[in-house]
Image: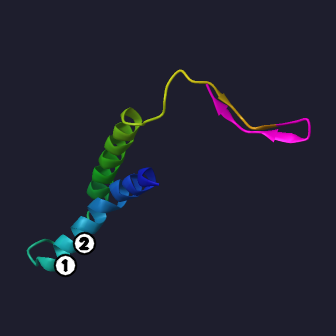
Amino acid sequence: MIRYIIIISAIILPFVFYYFLVRFTKKINKKFPIITLSFISLLLLICSLVYLRFTSADPTGLKYTPPKYENNKVVPSKIK
């Protein structure tokens, strides 16, 4: 769940930051720079995906066996 929050915040954060910056300071032009904010958002998204890729806690080299149905019983999944 935290992965989804990080990804969504990386996409939305530049737009929210710009909105509050324009809202609370009157010095910035009110023209909405959608392309610049989109590039910043894309850069943050790529950085967060790279971070999540290299910090995942999934064990490597293990084999996953899905649950199966044998002899009228459900055999649970296994990770070896």
Pointer 2 with pointer 1, Cβ within 8 A: yes
State how far apart marks 2 and 1 are (Cα): 6 Å
Q: Is residue 32 left or right of residue 58?
A: left
> What's the mark number on residue 19?
2
In which quarter of the view is residue 24 placed? bottom left
Mark 1 lies on a secondary structure that is helix
Disc 1 crowd, CA 10 A, few/some/many (<14, 14-19, 20+): few
Above or below, 22 relative to 46: below
Residue at left 11%, top 76%?
Answer: 25
Residue at left 86%, top 41%?
Answer: 73
Report x, y in % for residue 80: 61, 25
- The range drawn in magenta is 69-80
Residue at left 8%, top 74%?
Answer: 27
Q: Is residue 54 left or right of residue 71?
A: left
Report x, y in % for residue 4: 45, 54
80 or 4: nearer the eye? 80
Q: Is residue 50 left or right of residue 77?
A: left
Report x, y in % for residue 70: 87, 34
Residue at left 49%, top 29%?
Answer: 59
Q: Which residue is mark 1?
A: 23
Above or below, 40 relative to 26: above
The answer to whether residue 30 is seen in the rendering is: no
Disc 2 crowd, CA 10 A, few/some/many (<14, 14-19, 20+): few
Q: Is residue 21 left or right of residue 72?
A: left
57 or 14: nearer the eye? 57
Residue 78 part of the magenta segment: yes
The answer to whether residue 25 is seen in the rendering is: yes
39 or 65: nearer the eye? 65
